[in-house]
Image (cartoon, grey):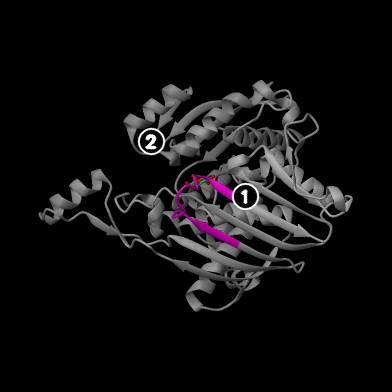
């Protein structure tokens, strides 16, 4: 196996998922390249050191600017907050590194275009972390569609529901700040749904969107609260404004005539990572929910009427995508496997010199739908996706 040195920027939730995937991928998949966890990068030294030690990184650094320039680094893996993706990716591309970037690709279409352009000019491999494309049951859904089992698609209906900020005491973390996250569950969660829709159904043409806020002010995280109290010298201060939406609802028309809906919220008690879609076509229907990620529901109008009904396929047979690398049938897989699949495919594309998917172009397409939807919410009218794409040269 040939070593491929990785520099990872960021060390929180995605840093952990990626570190694990990078270490496990060669154990399960036959690949020419073997990623080496060379250097992990972050701003805060103590937690960074701990992450490096625990996850087996050879070195740590507090300067991404230095890491992207290092001659011994082949791949830059971006796991930081959205506001930093563009600068890191452009610098990595300029230094001819392959790039794996977490989603959403950028803060807006302008940044996404710049990132795509830099990656194309550098002729490097680039991929975006829309990991749900790599759930075997989702791949199976695509195969059933391609095999014509669903027929002409009429409807896409998707919801991504979570509940982690229902508590008004939940603090104002970065995901609730526009200048860092770009948007709220719209960018964080709807981006996954839009990518899945592009993958399974086709391109989105126009959108109408509504967004809302349920809790406008939240207490600052503990570290900042102390600082703000010191600065203002007033006790009881330490509250900040939520500058992203709390929920977003998008109605969409697709280029191929499909009518669709995308709903994203963090205010759905009991829904933890309810990434859900339904597809209805002339011959049948499909239903998927990530909380039951090994299953795909399938209804076929082509079966005898007396036995028609939704059936649940347990997508853990060797014939199902990715599964032959894992366990015998029924020995289910989990969230972390989606990241291992991403890296297996990414490394294979480097090996075969093929184009990874979803790449920065797919990330840009997704970003355009996200931006068009927010513009629609602002204007209170329907917006064509191409208007947003054209608006930024
Ligand atoms: C948010 O809670 C989040 O972690 C997203 O950022 C991820 O992309 C999604 O997969 C799970 O939820």
Q: Quadrant of residue 44?
A: top left
Residue at 75%, 36% (x, y): give it: 321
Does 190 sit left or right of 1 as displayed?
A: left
Image location of residue 350, percent across then percent down: 70, 36
Is residue 289 highlighted in magenta?
no
Horizontal side of residue 292 vs 220, given as left or right = right
Nearer the observer, 64 or 226: 226
Query: Given contact means CB atoms under 8 Å apart, are the residues at marks 2 and 1 in contact?
Result: no
Density class for disc 1 (Cα within 10 Å; few <14, some 14-19, many ≥20) is many
Q: Residue at x 38, y 26 (%)?
A: 50
Callout count: 2
Residue 313 sits above or below residue 279 on the image = above
Quadrant of image for the N terminus: top right
* Residues rendered magenta in the picture: 262-276
Element assignment for label 2:
loop
Element on which disc 1 rests: helix
- In the rendered image, residue 99, in percent from the top left (x then y), is placed at 59, 42
Q: Earlier in the sequence, mark 2 or mark 1?
A: 2
In the foreground, 301 or 7: 301
State the CA–CA distance, disc 2 to disc 1: 24 Å
**Quadrant hosting residue 61:** top left
Give how far across and how far down residue 64 sits, in percent: 44, 40
Hey, which residue is sitting farthest front in the picture? Answer: 306
Q: Which residue is mark 2?
A: 62
Residue 9 visible: no
The spot of residue 169 in percent (x, y) is: 29, 50
* 329 sits left or right of 207 in the view: right
Q: Which residue is mark 1?
A: 119
Q: Is residue 253 visible?
A: yes
Q: Is 318 above or below relative to 117?
A: above
């Amino acid at each position: 196996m040939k070593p491929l040195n990785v520099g990872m920027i960021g060390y929180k939730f995605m840093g952990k998922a990626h570190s694990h995937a990078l270490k496990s991928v060669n154990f399960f998949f036959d690949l020419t390249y073997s990623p080496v966890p060379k250097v992990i990068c972050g701003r805060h030294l103590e937690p960074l050191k701990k992450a490096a030690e625990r996850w087996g990184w050879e070195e740590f650094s507090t300067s991404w600017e230095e890491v992207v320039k290092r001659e011994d680094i082949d791949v830059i893996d971006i796991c930081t907050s959205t506001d930093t993706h563009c600068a890191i990716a452009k610098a990595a591309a300029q230094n001819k590194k392959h790039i794996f970037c977490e989603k959403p690709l950028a803060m807006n279409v302008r940044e996404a275009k710049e990132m795509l352009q830099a990656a194309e000019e550098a002729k490097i491999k680039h991929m975006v972390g829309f990991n749900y494309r790599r759930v075997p049951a989702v791949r199976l859904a695509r195969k059933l569609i391609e095999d014509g089992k669903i027929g002409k698609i009429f409807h896409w209906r998707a919801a991504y529901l979570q509940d982690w900020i229902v508590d008004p005491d939940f603090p104002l973390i970065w995901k609730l700040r526009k200048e860092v996250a770009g948007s709220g569950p719209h960018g964080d969660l709807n981006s996954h749904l839009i990518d899945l829709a592009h993958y399974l159904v086709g391109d989105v043409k126009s959108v109408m969107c509504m967004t809302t806020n349920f809790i406008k002010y939240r207490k600052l995280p503990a570290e900042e609260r102390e600082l703000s109290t010191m600065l203002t010298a007033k006790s009881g201060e330490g509250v900040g404004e939520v500058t992203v939406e709390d929920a977003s609802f998008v109605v969409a028309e697709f280029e191929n005539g499909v009518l669709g809906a995308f709903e994203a919220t963090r205010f759905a008690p009991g829904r933890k990572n309810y990434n859900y879609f339904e597809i209805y076509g002339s011959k049948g229907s499909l239903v998927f929910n990530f909380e039951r990620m090994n299953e795909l529901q399938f209804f076929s109008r082509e079966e005898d009427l007396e036995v028609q009904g939704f059936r649940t396929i347990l997508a853990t047979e060797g014939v199902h995508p990715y599964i032959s690398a894992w366990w015998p049938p029924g020995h289910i897989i989990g969230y972390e496997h989606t990241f291992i699949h991403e890296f297996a495919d990414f490394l294979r594309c480097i090996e075969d010199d093929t184009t990874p998917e979803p790449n920065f172009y797919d990330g840009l397409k997704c970003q355009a739908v996200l931006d068009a939807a927010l513009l629609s919410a602002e204007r209170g009218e329907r917006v064509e996706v191409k208007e947003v794409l054209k608006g930024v040269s």
